[in-house]
Amino acid sequence: MSNIRNIVILTGAGISAESGIDTFRGGGGLWENHRVEDVATPEAFARDPDLVHRFYDARRAAIQQVEPNAAHYALARLDAEWEGNLLIVTQNVDDLHERAGASRVLHMHGEHLSAWCQSCDARHHWRGPLIDRPACPECSAETLRPDIVWFGEMPYRMEEIYAAVSEADLFVSIGTSGAVYPAAGLVQEAAAQGAQTVELNLERSQGSHFFDVTRLGPAGQLVPAWVE
Ligand code: BJW
C-alpha cells in the first residue's frame, strides 16, 4: 500500500454478523420478519409509534449484549496505526467499531444508542427504552425518536463522506449488499476519482462489478487478513 495515503472504508451489516447481529436482507435477515414500511419510515413512526419504538427498543437492548469481532478489531488497529487519512463510513447503527477502539468512524444511518428530539433537535446518548415516551433532557418535550435514518430520509454527513471519497486512493467496502443508496453509489464515485476499489463480502454485492478486487468470505477472517 506504498502509494496509498487516503483510505475510505464503507461497512455494512455483514461486518457485525459474526458478533450476532442480524443482517437486513437474505435468509433470516431483519426484513424477512418486518416490513420496511411498518418500521423503518417516518410515515410508519407517525402512524404507529409504539410498534416502531418496540422494534428499536428491542434492537437497542440486543446490541448491548454483543461484542465486537475480529473484523472490528482489525479495522480499529488500522485506524490507530494508519498515518494518512482514514474514514470508516458505517451504515451500521451499532457501536461495535467504537467499542473495538476505532475513532475515525462516521455513522451515516444513525445510531441505536442515540435519541433525537424532534422538538429541539438535541441528541442524547440513550441506552434504555423510548416506548415510555421519556422527556427530552434538553427541552422536556416527549418527542424523542430513535436517531436512525429511515427510508426517504437524508443520510447523515453526506458532504463529509463525498469529500473523503473524492480524495480517496483506496475505497474498501465490507459486508454490505449494495442495495441501499446513496451508500451503494459510493464505489462508483471512488472509482471515477481513480481510487482502487476493494470489496470484502460473504457474497458478491449488487455492485460487485464496480470493484477492482472482490474477496469472498466471512469478515472475521477476510478483514484481519487484509489489514495485515
Ligand atoms: C457478510 C457476512 C459475514 C453477511 N461477513 N459479509 C437512488 C439514489 C438515492 C436514493 C435512492 C435511490 N434509489 C432508491 C433510493 C431510496 C432509498 C433506497 O436506497 N432504497 C433501496 C431499497 C432501493 N434510500 C433512502 O431512502 C436513503 N435516503 C435517501 O436516499 O435520501 C435522499 C433523499 C431524502 C429525502 C428526499 C429526497 C432524497 C436512506 C436509507 C436509509 C437506510 N436505512 C436502513 C435502516 C435503518 C437502520 C435500522 O433500522 O437498523 O439502514 S435500511 C438497512 O439497509 C440499514 C442498512 O444500513 C442498510 C444497508 O444494508 P446492509 O448493511 O448492506 O445489510 P444487508 O443485510 O443488505 O447486507 C448484508 C451483507 O453482508 C450481504 O452482502 C452479505 O453477503 C454480507 N454478510 N454475513 C461478511 N459474516
Image (cartoon, rainbow, N blue to C red):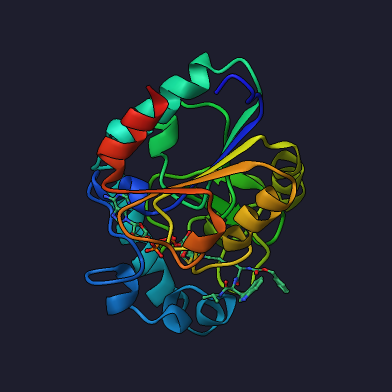
Residue 21 shown left or right of residue 110 in the figure: left
Q: Nearer the viewer, residue 216 or 167?
A: 216
Residue at left offset 37%, top offset 27%: 74
Residue 224 falls left or right of residue 123? left
Side of 136 where 71 appears, left or right: left
Give x and y (percent) for residue 58: 30, 60
For the point 75% across and 37% down, the residue is 167
Q: Quadrant of residue 86?
A: top right
Image quarter of residue 113: top left
Decide: is 138 above or below 76: below
Residue 20 at x, y = what percent? 22, 49
Q: Is residue 225 above or below residue 199?
A: above
User: With respect to residue 158, does 80 lie above or below?
Assistant: above
**What residue is rendered at 33% in x and 78% in y?**
34
Whether residue 192 is visible here, answered yes or no, is yes
- On-image quarter of the C terminus: top left
**Residue 132 falls in image quadrant:** bottom left
Q: Residue at x 35, y 46 (%)?
A: 15
Image quarter in which the N terminus is found = top right
* Image location of residue 71, percent across then percent down: 33, 35
| Residue 16: image location, x then y, percent | 32, 46
Which sits in the foreground, 117 or 199?
A: 199
